[in-house]
Structure formats: structure tokens, C-alpha cells
Image: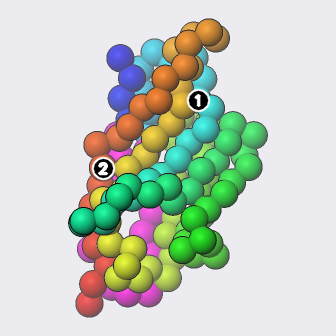
């Protein structure tokens, strides 16, 4: 059974920083793309950042230059460093990954979500 466990959310003032972590555990052969999504109240879930197995990254326009996604393959963990936070970044943040259980099987998994609130 594969689990993704997030940590690092919380309350921060505008202009502040947070780092989210997502750790995968279970019977994992390998992890392909790793992603962070967010969902604000009353809005659809949106893709924030993605990092491929080769380390290629891409970001939503709204966070470019402020957020950085990274990964530690050995620890099956990925991160989202969020700088210069704005009130509009307030949302529940979810990690997501394409995980191979064997060389022939791959599924998408989600974390439970962590609340990020940006407010003075």
C-alpha cells in the first residue's frame, strides 16, 4: 500500500515563506512525475508545480519566480519551497505523484492535503 504524507503547512504573514514536504512510502518500484496542486475555497483544484523524473520543472504562471519544486529520489520525498507568499496563495495544498509499483504498473496517488494560510 502506497501512502503520501504531507507536512509543512501553516499560517504565515504576506511576504513570508513556507516549505511543504511530501514523503512517499510503501512498496514502490519508482516514482515518475511529482506534483503539487492547490485548492482554494470555492475554486477548482489547480496544478501549481511539477517535476519530472529527470528533474525538469514547470510552474503555474501565478507562482513562477516565487515557488520552487525539488525532489530527493533516495528519500522518495519532494518539496515545495514557497517564497513571497500572498493572501491569494491561501489554499489546501496536495501532493500527487505517478508511482510505479512494478516496471509494468503505474498509478497516480494523492496526499491528504495540508492547509496554507497567508494572512496578517
Where residue 83 appears, as percent x and y from the top left, is 51, 76
Task: Give me the residue at 54% from left, 31% from top.
Answer: 98
Distance Cα–Cα, label 1 vs label 2: 19 Å
How far from the left and from the top, in percent, is residue 72? 60, 42
How crowded pointer 2 is (Cα within 10 Å; few <14, some 14-19, many 20+) is rated as many
- The answer to whether 16 is drawn above or below residue 91 in the figure is below
Disc 1: which residue: 31
Q: Residue at x 45, y 63 (%)?
A: 19
In the rendered structure, are the residues bearing label 1 and label 2 in contact, judged by CB atoms less than 8 Å apart?
A: no
Considering depth in this image, is 89 or 1 the residue closer to the camera?
89
Element at label 1 = strand
* Disc ID at residue 59: none
Residue denoted by label 2: 113
**What quarter of the picture does the N terminus occupy?**
top left
| Quarter of the rendering containing residue 73 | top right
Judge the density around disc 1: few (<14), some (14-19), many (≥20) Cα neighbours within 10 Å.
many
Look at the image and give the residue range highlighted in magenta. 5-22
Residue 32: give x, y in percent of width and height. Answer: 62, 32
Residue 10 visible in the displayed image: no
116 left or right, relative to 73: left
Vertical comparison of 32 with 51: above or below:
above
Amino acid at each position: 500500500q502506497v501512502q503520501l504524507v504531507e507536512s509543512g503547512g501553516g499560517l504565515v504573514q504576506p511576504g513570508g515563506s513556507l516549505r511543504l514536504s511530501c514523503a512517499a512510502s510503501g512498496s514502490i518500484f519508482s516514482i515518475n512525475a511529482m506534483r503539487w496542486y492547490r485548492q482554494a475555497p470555492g475554486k477548482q483544484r489547480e496544478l501549481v508545480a511539477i517535476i519530472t523524473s529527470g528533474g525538469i520543472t514547470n510552474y503555474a504562471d501565478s507562482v513562477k519566480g516565487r515557488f520552487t519544486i525539488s525532489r530527493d529520489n533516495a528519500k522518495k520525498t519532494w518539496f515545495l519551497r514557497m517564497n513571497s507568499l500572498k493572501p491569494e496563495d491561501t489554499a489546501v495544498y496536495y501532493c500527487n505523484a505517478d508511482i510505479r509499483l512494478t516496471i509494468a504498473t503505474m498509478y497516480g496517488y494523492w496526499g491528504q492535503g495540508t492547509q496554507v494560510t497567508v494572512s496578517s
